[in-house]
Amino acid sequence: MKTKAMFYEKIKNKVHCYLCPHNCVIENGRFGKCRVRKHEDGDLFTLNYGEITSAALDPIEKKPLHYFKPHTYILSVGTFGCNFTCDFCQNYSISQFVPQNGHFKGEFPEQRNAVTHWAFEDHPVSSNYVPKEDLVRTAMVTKNNIGIAFTYNEPSIWYEYVYDCAKLLKGKDPEASVVLVTNGYINEEPLKLLLPYVDAMNIDLKSFNNAFYRNLCGGTLKPVLRTIEVAAKSCHVEVTTLLVTGENDNVEEVEEIAEYLSTIKSDIPLHLTRYFPRYHRMNPPTDIDFMKRAGEVARKHLSRVVLGNI
C-alpha cells in the first residue's frame, strides 16, 4: 500500500531520503535505489507498506539465531525490494527486480487483504496487503509462536510497516519478540528509533573489505559496522558472513571479522555460511575444508562460531 514515508526532506524540486546511507536525492516521479520509495510532487512515499510476499512459521535457528530463544518458532514475513544489489542474492526473486518503466503496473489495493501482482522486469511478484492489526493479531494467536521476524528481503526499506507492527506488538504483549534479519545498511537515526521495539537481530557482515561491498553489493562497509555496534548495545545480535568462493573466502579476512566482533562482545555469535551459486554469481560452492579452517580461526577470538550450509 502506498504510504507517506519517514526520514526525508525537500531539496528544491527533489527530495533527500535519509533512511539508509545511500542518502538518495530523488527527482520527481523517480525511485530511490531501494526501488520502493518514490518521489511524488515534493513528498516521498513508500510503496510496500503492508505488502507481504512471503510468510512462514520458521524455527528461530533458520534466521539464523542460534542463541536467542533456541528451539522456538517465529512468524516470519517479508516484502519486496532491497537497498543492496548483491549478485549472489539468495532471495533475488523478491529483492532484485526493478519496476517496469520505473513504476509498478496496476493500482494500489484499497480493500483489506487484496492480492496485488507487481510487474517487474521479467518476474511477476504477488503480494498480499496485510494491515498491521491483522499481522499482530495473527502473531499473537499462532500456536507456539514467539513473535514476528522481518526477514526474506531487507526489512529496513520496509521501515514504516516494521516500526508500526513492532510498536503495536510490544504494546499488546511486551514479552513477544521482534526480530530483524538485515544487511545493516540503515542510518543511525532510524535505527535508534526502532531499536526499543527490537529483541534480536541477525546482521549480515558480508565482508571486511569495502571493495567487496561496492563491487558485489552496491554499498559500503562502514555503516554496517556502525549498525552492529549500536544494535549490540540494545538487543541480542548475531552476525552472518557468507563466504563466497574467490571473493572473501580467505582466512585473513575471517580473522579480521572475528577480531573486530570480539572488540564489541567476545561471545557475539558469528555464523560463517557456505556459499552456493545463485542469481548472477556462478562461482563454485565454498570448499568444505576451508569452511572448517575458517571456523577454527574465528574461534581464536570468539566463543560462539557456527558453520552454516554445510
Image: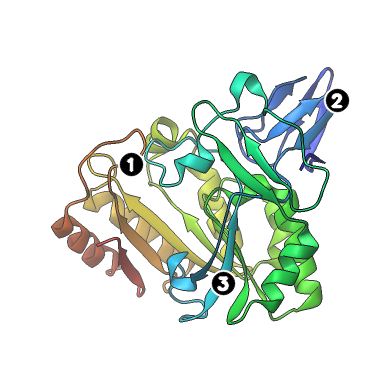
Q: Amino acid at mark 2?
A: Gly
- 2 or 3: mark nearer the eye: 3
Q: CA distance from mark 1 to mark 3?
A: 26 Å
Q: Which quarter of the figure is the N terminus placed in?
A: top right
Picture colour scheme: rainbow
Q: Which quarter of the figure is the C terminus placed in?
A: bottom left
Residue in front for this viewpoint, 113 or 259: 113
Left or right of 39 in this view: 41: right
**Which of the two labelled residues, at mark 2 and mark 3, occupies the earlier sequence position?**
2
Pointer 1: residues within 10 angstroms few (<14), some, or many (20+)? some
Residue plotted at (37% across, 63% down): 271
Q: Secondary structure at mark 3?
A: strand
Q: Which mark is residue 42?
A: 2
Residue plotted at (74% across, 79% down): 174
Q: CA distance from mark 2 to mark 3?
A: 39 Å
Residue at image mark 3: 74
- 2 or 1: mark nearer the eye: 1
Total labels: the figure holds 3
Residue at image mark 1: 278
Residue plotted at (61% across, 35% down): 34
Q: Amino acid at mark 1?
A: Arg
Q: CA distance from mark 2 to mark 1?
A: 39 Å
**x then y, percent, for residue 184:** 55, 50
**x then y, percent, for residue 172:** 80, 76
Q: Secondary structure at mark 2?
A: loop
Residue in front for this viewpoint, 286 or 139: 139
Visible residue check, residue 62: yes
Pointer 2: residues within 10 angstroms few (<14), some, or many (20+)? some
